[in-house]
Amino acid sequence: MKRRKFLKILLFTVIGICFANILSLAEKYTKKTIRLIKNNKYPGRIKPINEETILKEGSWSG
Amino acid sequence: MKIQCDLCPKRCIISPGESGDCRIRVNIDGRLHAVTYGYPCALHVDPIEKKPLFHFLPGTKAFSIATAGCNLHCRNCQNWEISQSAPVDVPAYKAPPSKIVESALKHNCETVAYTYTDPSAFYEYTLDTSKLIKKENRKNIIVSAGYFNPVPLRRLCRYIDGANIDLKFIHDKYYREICGGTLKPVLDVLQILVEEGVHLEVTNLVIPTLNDNSRDIKKLCSWIFNNLGKNIPLHFSRFYPQYKMKNLPPTSISILKRALNIAKDAGLEYVYIGNVIGEKWESTFCPNCGRLLIEREGYYIKKNVVKYGCCPYCGYSIYGVWS
Ligand SMILES: [Zn+2]
């Protein structure tokens, strides 16, 4: 009985931790990404600077 | 080793290989790295009126930059595609501070604006770029939700000339529910900016059923009047349904007009309605003699008679940065 109760608590704890991780906004980075960041490289895709796009009024608010 | 970030009031405790709530600041081997430093996802030349800054070098251009990520998570964010994404998922330009200065000068921009997402999250990039811009005798402006801690904010104030800060709600409850933040730090930031002599304008997005009631608007205006001053321009902005808040209608023009009247009755001298085109509430009138000083149509300046920072008809000093 005691063992059953313990397993139940353990199961809920594991589920709880999983949910907390999913809900967390913190980003977890892969080893490859961390290597890039360490070398001051951007972890995402780099796009070329286009002077025409710069001159157009920004589509973003603010 | 876990580390605590003390840039914003969230004071995230960050585990190795993880980022703070802003998704920008990553703990690598016990040191914080700002992963978007030198990698803006947006570069644009905007009219300064778009920020909106109405009392700051009217009719000039602002070289506007932003990086991915934000320390607030507003359910109504207009720029959520870049603000609510991790840098890994947002393509960016390679543009170190020196490149921003070069581009701003090339495009004849009087100012560099740190905007769209939030300079309180891409802080170091803002700080270093603004130092270089000052050396070129140009100006820096921030457009922000004002979620900074006092120490880093005061350090940045040495190089910042103007700010438009969102005062989203006058109730802490809504800051928590809608933005994942708190009210008090934003009020502190507004007061610090005034104390530090940074030109300040405030924006309040009027959202139907949330903050559009007369009592809240009056409370917000009175707070500005009592704590910042009657001359701080206030922009009421029209809400449009988007991101996670598509269930609410756009703000009606009559509610915005009511807000404007409440603000004037509260004693504020310069009140505007934004996100609505073709109305006279985007022009500046002299608070003393009532004459039209700056006539705007959208972001376009049709007329500007402010002379040496004063009304040419009665000599009243008009709050702003005019040269
Ligand atoms: Zn006058």
Image: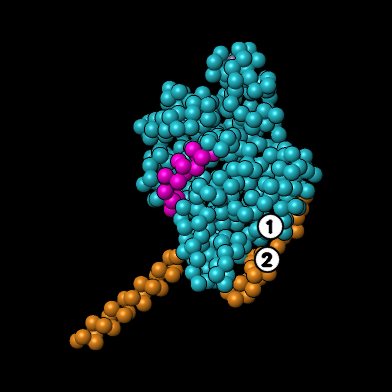
Chain colours: A orange, B cyan
Pick out the residue farthest to the left.
Answer: A1
Q: Residues within 10 Å of mark 2 (few under 14, many from 20)?
A: some
Residue at 48% x, 32% y: name it: B228
Look at mark 1 in the image and give the residue it sits on.
B38
Question: Which residue type does callout 2 highlight?
Answer: Asn
Q: Numbered disc 1: what chain?
A: B
Q: Is residue A11 visible?
A: yes
Which secondary structure type mostly characterizes the magenta part of the structure?
A: helix
Residue at 68% x, 20% y: name it: B307
- Residue B18's mark? none
Question: Which residue type does callout 1 highlight?
Answer: Gly
Residue at 70% x, 29% y: name it: B323
Front in this rendered view, residue B304 or B119 = B119
Look at mark 2 in the image and give the residue it sits on.
A40
Total residue callouts: 2
In terms of image quadrants, where is residue B139?
top right
Q: Is residue B292 above or below residue B35?
A: above
Q: Residues within 10 Å of mark 1 (few under 14, many from 20)?
A: many
Query: Where is residue B120 drawn, in percent x and y?
Result: 56, 50
**Range of the magenta residues?**
B179-193
What is the secondary structure assignment of the residue under circle 1? loop
